Amino acid sequence: MISTDDIRSLMNLPGEPARTRVVAAMSGGVDSAVAAALAKRAGYDVVGVTLQLYASDQLPKRKGSCCAGQDIYDAKAAAERIGIPHYTLDYAERFRRSVMEDFAASYARGETPIPCVRCNETVKFRDLLNAAKDMGASALITGHYIRRVEGTHGPELHRAADASRDQSYFLFATTRAQLDFVRFPLGGLPKSETRALAAELGLELAQKPDSQDICFVPNGRYSDVVEKLKPGAIEGGEIVDLTGRVLGRHEGVINFTVGQRKGLGLAHHESLFVIRIDAAKRQVVVGPREALATRRILLRDVNWLDAAPLGEAPRAVLARVRSTREPVRADVRCRDGAIEVELLGHEEGVAPGQACVLYDAAAPSRMLGGGWIVKGEAALAA
C-alpha cells in the first residue's frame, strides 16, 4: 500500500503539509476520490471541487457516463467521508464552448475528435487550474493514471505503472507551466489497489464502475449531438473509390472514420475501408486495406515538453496514434515550420482529428508531448 511518505514525495511541495492547500478535482468516481483521500491522509489542506458540465436540464442519464448528475452527489458524499470541504463549480457554458462545440465542428470537418483531450486541455487544466490558484492552492491533484517525475530539467510526465490504465495519451496537451502545478497521486498504482484503498477508507463508491466515453453522447449517436449543436451540418453525399468512381451514397460524413470497414452499406467483391473523408465535397473515399498504410504524419498545435526544442534534425521517438495502440518507433522533426512524424514501419487508420503522442525512444515511459493529426499518408509532399 502507498504510504504517507510516498504521497508527500509525489506531491513534492515546500512547507508543512498542514499549511499547504491543494485542490482535488473530484469527478464523482473512485479514482479522484482516492486521490483526494490520500492527500488528506498525508496531512494536506485539501479542498474538493467538482465541475458541473451541463445545465440542470441537460444532465446525461446514460448509466456509466462521466460527469452525470449522480456524480456530483457521489463527490459530495466522498468529500464528507474524507473530511474535506467540497464545492461545485458551474462550468456548463465553458464545457459547451470548449469541448462540445469543438467536437461538433471537428466531426463536421470530416475529422475524428477526442473530446476527453479537449476537456483536460481546457476546462480542467486551464480553467480549473486557474480557479485552484485563486483558492490559494499550491497544487491541483487529479485521479488520472499518469506519473509526474522530477527530472534533470524539471518535472516530466511518464506513463502509468499499470500500462492497462495509462492515460498519458489523453494528457499530451499538458504544458510545462501546468506540469509545475498538477499532481497525480495514482500514477504508480494498479486500479485494484485504488479500489482496495477506497474500501479501506470507507468510500461507498469503491466498486463504482468506471465512466465511459463520451459523456455527452447519448447511446453513442454522434450525429444527434452534431445536429443539435450545428443544425444543418449533416448532409448526405457520395461514397467513392480511390479513382473517384461512385459506389454508393451516405447520410453524412460524420458517420464515418478513417479505417472503418463495417457499416459502409456497400455490396462489393472485396473488403473496403474508409481511406479518407473529404467533408468539403461530402465524399467518403474507400479502398483496400493496404491503402490505409501510413508512414508520415503532419501535426498541428504540438505541445513539446522536452527541454531540447525540436529542430530539422530527426529525433528518435515512439509515436502513438490511437489510445488503444502501443507506441511504435518513429522520427520527429520540424521542417518549414511544420512538425512531421516519420514512422519507421507503418500504421493503419491514422485519422485527422486524432492525436499523435510522442514518447522518448531512450526512455519509453517518458512522454515528450504530441499534437493533432492533420494528415497521414504513405509519403507527404516535400
Image (spheres, grey):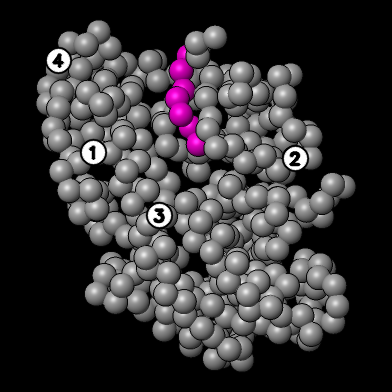
The numbered mark at residue 246 is 4
| Amino acid on which disc 3 is placed | Val
Element under disc 2: loop
Please state which amino acid type lies under the numbered disc 4.
Answer: Val
The residue mark sitting in front, 3 or 4, is: 3
Label 3: which secondary element: helix
Left/right of residue 47 with respect to residue 74 in the rendered view: right
Q: Is residue 272 above or below residue 147?
A: above
Which residue sits at x=80%, y=81%? 17
* 1 or 2: tag closer to the N-terminus: 1
What residue is pinned by disc 3? 99
Q: Nearer the viewer, mark 1 or mark 3?
A: 3
Where's residue 278, x and y in %?
28, 24
Residue 189 on the magenta span: no
Q: Are marks 1 and 2 in contact (CB under 8 Å)?
A: no
Magenta stretch bounds? 372-378
Relative to the observer, which residue lies in front, 151 or 101? 101
Query: Which comes before the other along the chain, label 3 or label 4?
Result: 3
Upstream in the sequence, badge 4 or badge 2? 4
Q: Earlier in the sequence, mark 4 or mark 1?
A: 4
Residue 49 higher or lower than 328, as above or below: below
Of residues 104 and 290, the one drawn nearer to the viewer in this rendering: 104
First reached walking from the N terminus: tag 1 or tag 3: 3
Q: Is residue 169 visible?
A: yes
- Residue 14 appears in which quarter of the rendering? bottom right
Horizontal side of 23 relative to 251 (left or right) equals right
Looking at the picture, how far across and down is residue 351, in whole percent?
A: 41, 31
Q: Residues within 10 Å of mark 1 (few under 14, many from 20)?
A: some
Residue 306 is marked as 2
**Residue identifier under label 1:** 255
In-image side of 221 versus 339 (left or right): left
Q: CA distance from mark 4 to mark 2?
A: 47 Å
